[in-house]
Image (tube, rainbow, N blue to C red):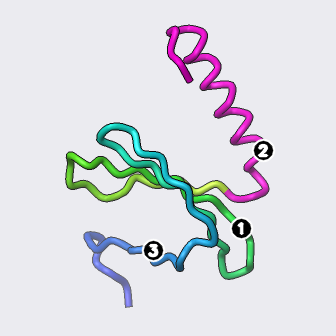
Amino acid sequence: PRRPPHQINIITMDKPEFTKCVSAKTRVYYMDVYADSKSNRYVSISEIDKKQNKPRQRIVVYADHIAEFMAALAETAEHIKTSANVKV
């Protein structure tokens, strides 16, 4: 049976293999490592805003894309650091 379009498909995740969290003022960032049903590992990066009661914002990066993702993140952080005189 088809679901009505207004119903949300909720993804359930098992307990992560590894977790790191960064607390930054009113936000908390979680980096969790999971394995999918085919044992492919991926990182789930999510953000919670402590002030607002909103669902987590989440992105998923699979292991085979980690190096490219990290290089782009490092380049982006370097750009912010050098162009805005921000300590990173």
CB under 8 Å between callouts 3 and 1?
no
Spatial distance from mark 2 to mark 1, Cα to Cα?
14 Å
Helix or strand or loop: what does disc 2 sit on? helix
Q: Nearer the viewer, mark 3 or mark 2?
A: 2
Q: Which residues are magenta?
A: 62-88
At a point 52% along the width and 9% down the height, the residue shown is 85
Instruction: List the residue tagged with mark 3.
Output: 11
Residue 67, numbered label: 2
Tell me the crowding category of disc 2: few under 14, some 14 to 19, or many 20 or more residues within 10 angstroms, Cα based: few
Residue 63, quarter of picture? bottom right
Helix or strand or loop: what does disc 1 sit on? strand
Name the amino acid, label 3: Ile
CB under 8 Å between callouts 2 and 1?
no
Spatial distance from mark 3 to mark 2, Cα to Cα?
26 Å
At a point 58% along the width and 57% down the height, the residue shown is 60
Task: Judge from the rendering whether residue 23 lies leftward or rightward of residue 63; answer left or right.
Answer: left
